[in-house]
Image (cartoon, rainbow, N blue to C red):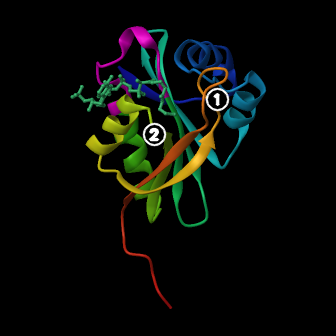
Amino acid sequence: MRLERLAVAHLDAVAALEEAGQVHPWKRATLARALADDTLEVWGAWRDAALLGYAVLAWLPFEAELQAITVVPHVRRQGVAGRLLAHLVTRARQGGAERLLLEVRASNTPALALYRQYGFDEDGRRRGYYPPVTRGGEREAAVLMSTSFKARAVD
Ligand SMILES: CC(C)(COP(=O)(O)OP(=O)(O)OC[C@H]1O[C@@H](n2cnc3c(N)ncnc32)[C@H](O)[C@@H]1OP(=O)(O)O)[C@@H](O)C(=O)NCCC(=O)NCCS
């Protein structure tokens, strides 16, 4: 498996992966904007010509945020997300971010386990943040998580 920074030329592959891997996939136009945005880094995990997973890192003034991570269903539980996440944690730390933040649906057990395994702790919850997964279902809480790289400077 190799990791590669993705660009607009990869839009078709990322859009297909997102459709296959997410309950609420990002729209193609949103993905196109993300791939062209200088404040974001979109990284892909490839095996030969197949895009197995991708993840999006956003640079904020003092922190970085994991905005998405998705792995194609038939290769899950083989370490693809772990490789991507470890890489983005390193990018964020080496790029000077104080913390890497993320938010995740409270019911997303695989993602919560992934984030805990890679050193993220829960900071709090936002009730009713996500739309229901199923029509007529209840809105769902976001779990806010982060991993810290250095103490915040205090004046
Ligand atoms: C969450 C997701 C990205 C994990 O991808 P993956 O490539 O299967 O993850 P990995 O194989 O790297 O797993 C790393 C660790 O995460 C945890 N994990 C991953 N899938 C899990 C599952 N189904 N159940 C429990 N723990 C799980 C485990 O701790 C695992 O380590 P282990 O296999 O040594 O036990 C994948 O399930 C996915 O794409 N889900 C849909 C999109 C999504 O929910 N993204 C996150 C929120 S935006």
Q: Earlier in the sequence, mark 1 or mark 2?
A: 1
Q: Please state the horizontal and vertical placement of residue 78, each as a whole percent of the image.
A: 29, 18
Residue 42 located within the stretch drawn in magenta:
no
Q: Secondary structure at mark 2?
A: loop
Measuring 74% from the left and 22% from the top, which residue is drawn there? Answer: 28
Magenta stretch in the rendered image = 70-82
- Ligand 1's quadrant is top left
Name the amino acid type tagged 1: Ala
Residue 77 lies in what quarter of the image? top left
Image side of residue 146 versus residue 126, left or right: left
Vertical comparison of 131 with 123: above or below: above
- 133 and 146: which is toward the camera: 133
Q: Please state the horizontal and vertical placement of residue 141, each as a whole percent of the image.
A: 53, 44
| Residue on which disc 1 sits | 7
Q: Secondary structure at mark 1?
A: loop
Vertical comparison of 17 with 150: above or below: above
Vertical comparison of 12 with 114: above or below: above
